[in-house]
Image (cartoon, rainbow, N blue to C red):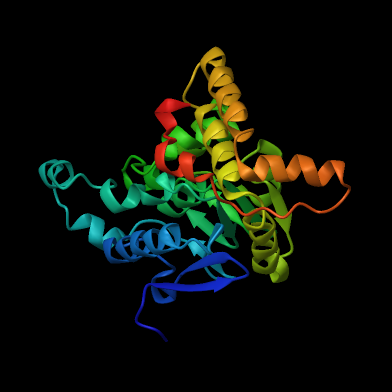
Amino acid sequence: MSDRLILTEVRDRVGLIRLNRPQARNALCAALIGELRRALDVFEADDTIGAIVVTGTEFGFAAGGDIKEMSSLGSLDQAYLQEFNAGDWLRLSTCRKPTIAAVAGYAFGGGCELAMMCDFILAADTAKFGQLEVTLGLVPGGGGTQRLPRLVGKSKAMEMCLSGRLMDAVEAERAGMVSRIIPAAGLLEEALRTAASIANLSRPVVMMIKECVGRAYEMPLAEGLLFERRMSHAAFGLDDGREGMRAFAEKRPAVFNTRLRRSEQQGLHREDI
């Protein structure tokens, strides 16, 4: 068994990250989260990687935070001063490349929160989601009370957070938390296929679209529509945009080079769009 808490590999321009703490049901200790952050940094910096898949094992994604480690905080002073659930924990939510959570088995507490940080979730038919902090006399601290209502609505999120009730894959898909349900045996391969199909598209356009959808949760509609429109305008200046339209007219597959024009690489910034 590897001593590493995160295992990484690259498949078909997809960065694969596996949580690797099976003896603790992939409980999210600080060391594991630190390794996750470093793996994401490497994949973000690698121009050959177009998408990232985060997964656990066929038996479980992550059972939550490391309770033994959390209990060592001991006081409000320590939790507050150490800014628990900040720092490295936030890295997945700031990843610019598309991220997919492939969840089989349990995704509880911090594990559920980690999956929700990804752009979308593909769930095995064995998946179960839950925010169980209330059963420990704790409050979710990694986004459970914030991302869950945005995904499944206030009523269902309230019930889950207040009671600790679990949600299976079928209910999660029906509620909008999960994109698709896949038989457990084929979950990882389907997640990798989906990620590869995204990785082979225009990278700047994919990143623009990801940012537009993300803004939908943070902006009033009028501002979000304006942001989307400016991104749409900017895409016309990309080599990939011109190639995509030309390929359509010529009835051939587009060949995206995923690069901005040199002038745009030097001068295009989000605040300028």
Vertical placement of residue 133 versus 59, above or below: above
Question: How many badges with numbers are in the image?
Answer: 0
Q: Could you say which quadrant of the image residue 144 lies in?
A: top left
Nearer the observer, 74 or 271: 271
- Residue 106 drawn above or below residue 87: below
Q: Residue at x 35, y 56 (%)?
A: 65
- Would residue 257 be found to the left or right of residue 30 on screen? right
Q: Nearer the viewer, residue 271 or 39?
A: 271
Residue at (17, 53) in percent of width and height: 73
x, y percent for residue 238:
60, 40
**Taking 18 as reference, is 184 left or right?**
right
The quadrant the N terminus occupies is bottom left
- Kindly tell me whether residue 114 is visible in this rendering: yes
Q: Residue 268, located in which quarter of the rendered image? A: top left
Quadrant assignment, res 100: bottom right
Left or right of 160, for residue 191 = right
Give the farthest residue toward the right.
251
In this view, the residue farthest toward the top is 222
Is 145 located above or below residue 204 in the figure?
A: above
Relative image position of residue 240 (x, y in whole percent): 65, 45
**What is the x, y in percent for residue 117?**
47, 46
* Residue 126 in view of the camera: no
Residue drawn at x 56%, y 57% is 51
Task: Name the outermost residue toward the bottom.
Answer: 1
Residue name at image x 33 percent, y 39 percent: 139
Across and down, in percent, residue 227 comes to: 53, 23
